[in-house]
Image (spheres, rainbow, N blue to C red):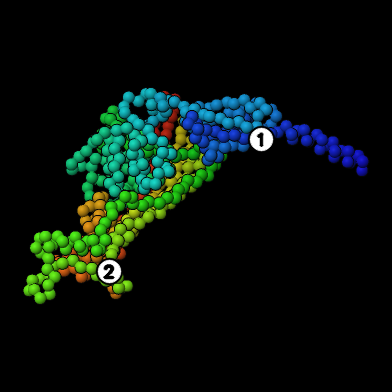
């Protein structure tokens, strides 16, 4: 028994010093401005042991006694090696790396280093658009690319923005640039006309985009001929990163509401001013004994017995709640590279019954068969539903046109209600009913509540894009690639 106790004591005493020599190092990684940097790789120098920083830039890592230094690295940052000594707290500030001349940009014939490109090409990283609450990627490019003009016509969901490169414009033809996704030109429609409903580029989930390269001159876009007269936008979707399979989730939740709406007259103020105008024009008449037609504006009591005072904003505008979710699985090794993602977006506009929903799937795969031959493919499916009332924005410019729902609330009389006292819609010959107002011809404005309830213009689009390729590289200086799409 004594021998057993002595043996256990010896084991404990031997383990304790070894255990005490292993320590935990914590810290925070920031950029030059002091902002935390997430997903920074923190490795023990000379080993594969490491961790990554959290969303707030913090990390925690157990290091053995033999560890001398930590190596911090991240995309877009200069790697930094830090000697740890006996410290348990190591904070690091990383500097941005200036490698623009070494960056690879997409051109018509493949890719080139930026320093070798003579044309005018600008690159926007996919991360810059992934977190924007937009329906399509181009709406998030505003202010991010010199010479590129993005104008969102209104707050209606999935209305295609005005996309101009170096001010190119046309009276009768589309001024939209050519869009090329993973080497395949895609149809964008003629968004210069008012007959286009929805936006075909909404089929591309912004969270699946790796880079956006915009070719702005003839030299950069010459391969596509006349189709590139307005410029070319090259979209490269994401692929797997070398290493084990990774599962990533990206999502956001937000709300949208109108700001600085003008303050309108109430019912009493409205009738007073209208009647004063009639009197000034010698058109006012409220004498029941007069043979002339009555002409005046009057209050109308609602079902509660109180005068109607309609706040038309409440019947048309709302606070839109939106959420977007994307989950992807990716990975790569020496021979195979794969990326699969699924996304769902449900967004509400500031005008009631203006909704946008998208469900999409993307699968990218590349397989190296031999040292000189590889194959690959891609398939993308997207279902988009654009829900809207007529005159509420299912067509470009419609919602905020002179008679659109977005503006009609500014001119509707507050002394009439969208509903009669029995609950039915207040309407007369296609316009809103006059109620107690005595005016010739009634009002020329329609009832927005009735339009929102029954006058629907819904669009549903299904997009399937697929391609497959085979690539031969018999020599280091020669590559032949054939794509079928």
Residue 128 horizontal side relative to residue 291, left or right: right
Residue 32 horizontal side relative to residue 221, left or right: right
Q: Residue at x 54, y 37 (%)?
A: 57
Q: Residue at x 28, y 35 (%)?
A: 165
Q: CA distance from mark 2 to mark 1?
A: 73 Å
Check the image and report above or below for 470 versus 360: above
Q: Residue at x 27, y 71 (%)?
A: 301
Residue 89 quadrant: top right
Is residue 241 visible in the rendered image? The answer is yes
Is residue 77 visible in the rendered image? The answer is no
Foreground of the two, 10 or 377: 10
Instruction: Give the label on residue 24, or none.
Output: 1
| Mark 1 nearby-residue class (10 Å; few <14, some 14–19, many ≥20) | few
Foreground of the two, 181 or 205: 205
In the image as oriented, which residue stretches furthest toward the right? Answer: 2
Q: Residue at x 15, y 67 (%)?
A: 296
Check the image and report above or below for 483 versus 382: above
Q: On the rendered image, what quadrant is the C terminus found in?
A: top left
In the image as oriented, which residue stretches furthest toward the bottom? Answer: 289
Query: How far across and down, in percent of the image, does residue 213 sit?
Result: 36, 34
Instruction: Give the label on residue 307, or none.
Output: 2
Query: How far across and down, in percent of the image, does residue 383 sit?
Result: 38, 53
Disc on the earlier residue, 2 or 1? 1
Q: Nearer the viewer, mark 2 or mark 1?
A: 2
Number of numbered discs: 2
Query: How far across and down, in percent of the image, does residue 290 sit?
Result: 8, 73
Residue 453 horizontal side relative to residue 60, left or right: left
Secondary element under disc 2, as helix, strand or loop, is loop
Secondary element under disc 1, as helix, strand or loop, is strand
Q: Are marks 2 and 1 in contact (CB under 8 Å)?
A: no
| Mark 2 nearby-residue class (10 Å; few <14, some 14–19, many ≥20) | some
Q: On the rendered image, what quadrant is the N terminus found in?
A: top right
């Amino acid at each position: 028994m004594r021998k057993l106790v002595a043996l256990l004591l010896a084991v404990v005493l031997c383990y304790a010093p070894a255990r005490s020599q292993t320590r935990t190092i914590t810290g925070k990684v920031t950029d030059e401005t002091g902002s935390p940097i997430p997903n920074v790789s923190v490795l023990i120098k000379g080993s594969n042991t490491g961790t990554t920083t959290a969303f707030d830039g913090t990390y925690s890592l157990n290091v053995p006694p033999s560890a001398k230094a930590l190596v911090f690295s991240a995309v877009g940052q200069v790697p930094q090696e830090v000697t740890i000594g006996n410290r348990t707290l190591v904070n690091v500030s990383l500097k941005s790396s200036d490698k623009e001349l070494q960056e690879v940009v997409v051109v018509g014939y493949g890719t080139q280093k930026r320093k070798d490109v003579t044309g005018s090409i600008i690159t926007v990283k996919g991360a810059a658009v992934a977190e924007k609450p937009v329906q399509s990627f181009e709406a998030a490019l505003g202010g991010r690319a010199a010479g590129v003009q993005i104008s969102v016509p209104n707050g209606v969901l999935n209305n295609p923005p005005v996309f101009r490169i170096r001010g190119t414009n046309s009276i009768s033809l589309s001024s939209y640039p050519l869009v090329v996704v993973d080497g395949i030109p895609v149809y964008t429609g003629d968004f210069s006309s008012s007959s286009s409903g929805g936006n075909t580029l909404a089929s591309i989930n912004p969270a699946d985009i790796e880079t956006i390269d915009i070719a702005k001159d003839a030299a950069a876009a010459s391969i596509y001929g006349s189709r590139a007269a307005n410029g070319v936008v090259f979209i490269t979707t994401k692929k797997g990163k070398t290493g084990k399979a990774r599962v990533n989730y990206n999502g956001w939740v937000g709300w949208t509401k109108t700001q600085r709406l003008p303050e309108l007259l109430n019912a009493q103020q409205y009738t007073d001013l209208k009647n004063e105008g009639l009197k000034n024009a010698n058109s006012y008449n409220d004498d029941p004994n007069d043979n002339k037609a009555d002409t005046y504006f009057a209050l109308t009591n609602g079902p509660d017995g109180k005068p109607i005072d309609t706040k038309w904003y409440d019947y048309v505008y709302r606070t839109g709640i939106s959420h977007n979710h994307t989950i992807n699985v990716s990975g790569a090794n020496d021979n195979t590279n794969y990326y699969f993602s699924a996304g769902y977006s449900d967004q509400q506009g500031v005008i009631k019954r203006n909704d946008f929903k998208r469900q999409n799937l993307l699968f990218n795969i590349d397989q190296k068969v031999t040292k000189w031959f590889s194959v690959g493919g891609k398939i993308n499916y997207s279902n988009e539903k654009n829900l809207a009332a007529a005159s509420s924005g299912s067509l470009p410019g419609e919602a905020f046109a002179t008679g659109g729902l977005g503006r009609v609330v500014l001119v509707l009389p507050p002394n009439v209600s969208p509903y009669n006292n029995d609950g039915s819609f207040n309407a007369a010959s296609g316009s809103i009913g006059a109620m107690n107002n005595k005016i010739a011809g009634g009002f020329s404005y329609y009832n927005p509540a009735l339009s929102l309830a029954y006058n629907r213009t819904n669009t549903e689009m299904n997009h399937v894009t697929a391609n497959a390729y085979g690539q031969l590289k018999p020599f280091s200086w020669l590559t032949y690639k054939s794509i079928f799409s």
